[in-house]
Image (tube, grey):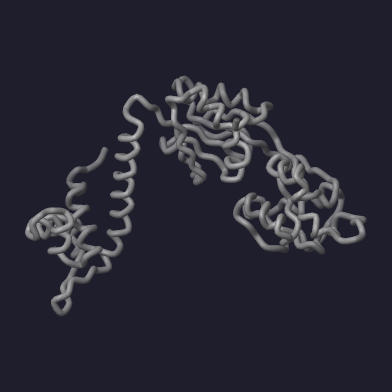
Amino acid sequence: MLNKRYLPSIAALQCFEAVTRHLSFTRAAEELNLTQSAVSKQVAQLEELLQHLLFRRVRRRLQMTPAGDLYLVEVRKILTQVEMSTHYLRSYGGETEVLRVSTPPTFGARWLVPRLKGWRLRHPSIHLDLCSEQEADDLLQGRSDLAFYFGQGSRPGTECLKLFGEELVPVCAPGSLPDKPFTDPTQLTDLVLLQNASRPQAWHDWFDHQGYHTEHSYHGPRFETFYMCIRAAQVGCGVALLPRFLVEEELADGKLVIPWQHAMPSTDAYYLAYPEHSAEVPKVRDFVKWMLEQIDSPPVSPM
């Protein structure tokens, strides 16, 4: 429960934020259509609550204190979130439900988003709020209703629905291939191994899966997402080790090729998780049911 003793008003936060931009109580008051004394009073009450000065006067000019600089970062986040939430509710109204779904970025863009037209056609009154930032406790803390993830099928306090596994294949641009075909997989190191930050062991495991070892399996530029790896491989930066289903389009179009024919099944899989207590919430239940239908189905045509 919030302690209201330490909860400033939105008006006070707005006054503080306006003063930080103008470094003038008078100009802040003009912007907010208030009197200068009203703005000064709001800021003074805020300083009393915080027990820190937010501004100081130096040679008759207003400057922010270190405490003011620190507080401003959080205040702007709060005001932006309140404004966004207000716009959101005004746009969709009270009859529209929002389903918050978190997803790994490349999985979301490559596999989930192409299927969302089917969801919208079936459930037009449930709007999806997709987020690629994931924290372990998002579901249990109520920041997300459902979460896609790659890993093992067990998370405390959640139901985990297995979607499918994956197999990793090496891919590169056609122009990156040498004139002579490779005779063993370790020769791929001549192309530069593109590393994915979330799978640091991937190349080592892929070589080991075939009975090979190279001291270069951890060498090469590192990328945060699979999408970055895909683009880097496309423009000739090297060879990437990627889930085949994420590069089917590039392989079919000839933008990427597989330089060594060996696919390694991952020991983990893709899952859809949701809190145990949400299993019978209609919008969650509907999404889970719809997702089960998508596992082996192609995306809905855009036409």
Based on the displayed image, in which of its 4 quarters is residue 224 positioned? bottom right
* Left or right: residue 84 compared with residue 183: left
Based on the displayed image, in which of its 4 quarters is residue 76 positioned? bottom left
- Residue 38 is situated, as x and y percent measured from the top left of the image, at 9, 55
Q: Is residue 78 above or below residue 122?
A: below
* Left or right: residue 95 compared with residue 110: left
- Residue 1 is situated, as x and y percent measured from the top left of the image, at 26, 38
Based on the displayed image, in which of its 4 quarters is residue 181 positioned? bottom right
* Left or right: residue 206 compared with residue 69: right
Q: Is residue 243 above or below residue 142?
A: below
The residue that appears at 25% across and 63% down in the rendered structure is 21
* Residue occupying the far front of the picture: 303
The residue that appears at 48% across and 29% down in the rendered structure is 275
The residue that appears at 13% across and 55% down in the rendered structure is 42
In the rendered picture of this protein, how many numbered marks are placed on residues?
A: 0
Comparing 120 with 98, the one in front is: 120
- Residue 209 is situated, as x and y percent measured from the top left of the image, at 82, 47
* Left or right: residue 171 compared with residue 68: right
- Residue 182 is situated, as x and y percent measured from the top left of the image, at 90, 56
The residue that appears at 33% across and 46% down in the rendered structure is 81
**The C terminus, quarter of image:** top right
